[in-house]
Amino acid sequence: MKRLLNTLYVTKEDAWLHKDGTNVVVDAGDAELGRAPIHMLGAIVCFGRIGASPALLGHCADHGVAVTFLTPEGRFLARMEGPHTGNVLLRRAQHRASAERAAALPVARAVVAAKLANQRQVLQRALRDHGADGEIEAASRRLANAARRALVTEDFDQVQGLEGDGANAYFSVFRRLIRRDEPELTFRGRSRRPPLDAPNALLSFLYTLLASDCRAAAETVGLDPQMGFLHRDRPGRAGLALDLMEEFRAPIADRLMLTLFNRGQLGPKDFRFVDGGAVLLADDARKTVLAAYQTRKRQEIRHPFLGETIHLGLAPHIQAQLLTRHLRGDLDAYPAFVWS
């Protein structure tokens, strides 16, 4: 499982990736930037105009190492992977459960309740670290109430509505969690495509990384990443990967964003403010974020269901495995990840 923590991120424009024995080598011009044993990698993620040799891509496909290509800003372009494996009976069970709302509802409820509880945990940590704050305390109560209701509702639309209500409560006070005075770092409400402020630019970048990890987790255990329970079918959307991602937005991405800002590791100079209002993460800052993201994934936690100490980055893979056990009938319910 340890290799699943190891992702090679390539950010150098016009870099060329090729195979040398059992190593992946990254070249730029006539210089070798680095190399790594392919069997130790879980994935390769490339940002910008980066090429790869057919020999390397074939070797990665044969050994289960997915190669993902993103724009310099982190928008998904393509993913190269080998043939799908996995138990056909498991996938049939997944397809049946996701297609029937009565079967999909318990999984969707668990995912939303865990997401809301994890968002509340972010707010509770802010209160412990920085003292009482009426707005944050009120938002925390709203999230707790929404999480409780999500666990018991029998209406699928209400589950989605509670998720939306929780998001409104959470992001309404998110600006108060950033302890910086620079106006360029002010959070002005959730915005995407394009992000309209620096916090949103960083969140969007981190969510892209997290979505890739959650998709890999689903595929590793033989699940179909397209067939979700909370996120319904849509062409080109990896619904199950997005389902898994909901449980980890707060503990992995949101907390890391706040850490990078509040510890002064990122500032206004690390963002590009584009005409028209869009804000993008600067090229050099991506390296800082990627290094911090890998460090965050190596943080040890105690898994709430298994009761074992694991690295946080392995939690999506464990959750995917627990979902397979539920679909096979080994677990009566899906135990979503609740961070503490």
Image (cartoon, rainbow, N blue to C red):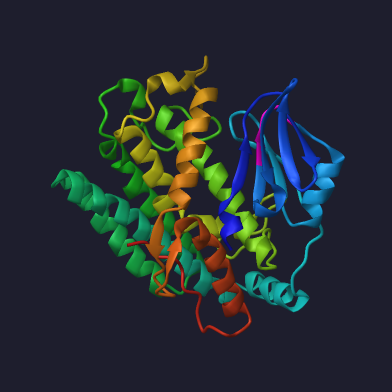
Using the rendered view, name the quadrant where residue 238 is placed.
Answer: bottom right
Q: Is residue 288 left or right of residue 127?
A: right
Residue 83: x and y in percent read 82, 59
Q: Who is closer to the viewer here, 47 or 58? A: 58
- The residue depicted at 65 percent of the width and 53 percent of the height is 40
- The residue depicted at 56 percent of the width and 54 percent of the height is 5
Residue 134: x and y in percent read 15, 46
Q: Who is closer to the viewer here, 225 or 58? A: 58
Q: How many marks?
A: 0
Q: Is residue 187 above or below residue 132?
A: above
- The residue depicted at 58 percent of the width and 52 percent of the height is 213
Q: Residue furthest left?
A: 132
Q: Is residue 137 left or right of residue 122?
A: left
Q: Residue furthest front?
A: 21
Q: Is residue 66 above or below residue 311?
A: above
Residue 8: x and y in percent read 62, 42
Q: Is residue 239 magenta?
A: no
Using the rendered view, name the quadrant where residue 124 is placed.
Answer: bottom left
Question: Can residue 335 be seen at all in this image of the molecule?
Answer: yes
Q: Who is closer to the viewer here, 216 or 288? A: 288
Residue span colored magenta: 45-50
Q: Is residue 158 left or right of residue 139?
A: right
- The residue depicted at 74 percent of the width and 78 percent of the height is 89
Q: Quadrant of the C terminus?
A: bottom left
Residue 298: x and y in percent read 46, 53
Question: Can residue 241 be seen at all in this image of the molecule?
Answer: no
Q: Who is closer to the viewer here, 15 or 258? A: 15
Q: Residue furthest top?
A: 275
Q: Quadrant of the N terminus?
A: bottom right
